[in-house]
Image: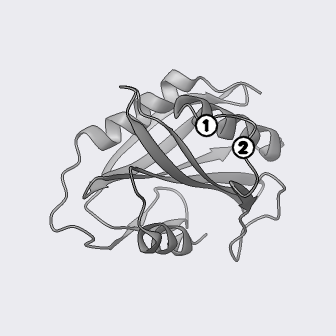
Amino acid sequence: MRIHSSALMACLLGALTLSACSPEQNWRDVTFEGSALKVQLPCKPDRTTRSVPLGGLPVDLQVVGCESGTAMVAVMSAALPAGSDASAVMAAWQKVTLDNARVTQPLAAGRQQAWHRPGQLPLATSLRVQAPGLRANGEPVNMDAVWGAVAEGERVRLVHAVIYDRKIAVELSMTLFESIQP
């Protein structure tokens, strides 16, 4: 399974580049087109949809993201074609995300844990990862990220939410991740 990291990062950065947020932590409900998936973001999100290869197949990756204070917040979602190996695609997506954030792998003990929300599929690759890394310019950054999957008829929809900041507020990550609903 192969994911092109440049395409994923372009989607994420494109959504976040245009964002401006005022006031800080002004939570709002956000939905994803063609899906029952919804989430709350702490600021007015920018949106983009791009066709990217996930698992060797082009899928429409929907990205919503914004800046809240010094934090970059994004939620991404992609519906996989029927019959796709959701676990393999999610594992590849995790690797690309961690590599792009220059997170040292394998992860230290306690940096990774199972992440399951009501209505999500109980996949072994549904994870929460908290780890230090580096921004593209070499500055240190912390990452708090989750990956999960929900069934949508014959297909599976993957969801990935991430926060990047020097110091991530517990309330920010808790509210964001708990708000993800299929």
Q: Provide the secondary structure element on which disc 2 rests.
A: loop
Judge whether 102 appears above or below 41 on screen. Answer: above
Q: Which mark is residue 122?
A: none
Q: How is the image coloured?
A: one colour
Are the residues tagged 2 and 1 within 8 Å (C-beta)? yes
Q: Nearer the viewer, residue 119 or 16?
A: 16
Image quadrant where one finds the N terminus: top right
Front in this rendered view, residue 119 or 9: 9
Residue on which the image places disc 1: 98
Please state the horizontal and vertical placement of residue 96, each as a whole percent of the image: 62, 31
Residue 117 in view (yes/no): yes
Residue sitting at 65 percent across and 34 percent down? Answer: 104
Q: Residues within 10 Å of mark 2 (few under 14, many from 20)?
A: few
Residue underneath mark 2: 107
Q: Residue at x 42, y 38 (%)?
A: 140
* Circle nearer the viewer, 2 or 1: 2
Q: Earlier in the sequence, mark 2 or mark 1?
A: 1
Give SS at disc 1: helix
Residue type marked 2: Leu
